[in-house]
Image (cartoon, rainbow, N blue to C red):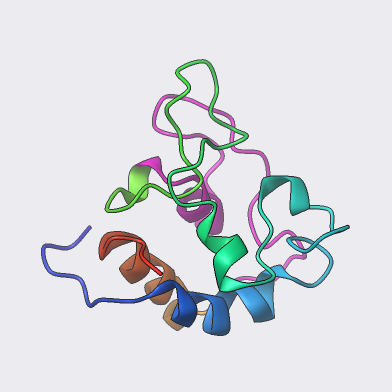
Amino acid sequence: CDASPPTVKLGTVHTDVLTPKCLTGCHAPGGTGAFYGDYTSVATSNAVVGAASKYEGTPKKLKVVEANKLANSALWLKLLGKTMGPNMESLGGKMPNDGTTLTAAQLKTVKDWICSGATM
């Protein structure tokens, strides 16, 4: 993370990134990615902060989102298309998994949110 990232709250991430990119068929109840996180509201999205990643591997250290730690946040790594976590955890596929990518602005929003503390 940068030394002084701009403060971004989860509400902004939810509006600008999660709702348009993650809810369509995936991270909503009944969606293919709901097992990995329900992003239908700010409150349900907040549950991934500090939660163990389903991809935590044998070290059991990888988080879905770890505040102030991009390299240990599976969400961030998957958005970048990484296939391995910091302790060689398999991350599964890239997100979003519909073949689209996030814009540079959307990626910056997620990065700044994680780096500014991943708060609501």
> Residue 96 at what x, y percent from top left?
67, 63
Figure quadrant of residue 2 = bottom left
Q: Is residue 60 above or below residue 13?
A: above
> Residue 108 at what x, y percent from top left?
38, 74
> Residue 14 at what x, y percent from top left?
55, 76
| Residue furthest to the right | 30
Figure quadrant of residue 27 = bottom right
Magenta extent: 72-101
* Residue at (32, 70) in percent of width and height: 112
Q: Is residue 70 above or below residue 21?
A: above
The quadrant of the rendering that contains the C terminus is bottom left
Horizontal placement of 75 versus 54: left or right? left
* Pick the front one: 82 or 65: 65
Figure quadrant of residue 9 = bottom left
Magenta stretch encompasses residue 74: yes
* Residue at (41, 25) in percent of width and height: 87
Magenta stretch encompasses residue 109: no
Horizontal placement of 35 versus 110: left or right? right
Q: Main secondary structure of the magenta part?
A: loop
Horizontal placement of 76 versus 26: left or right? left
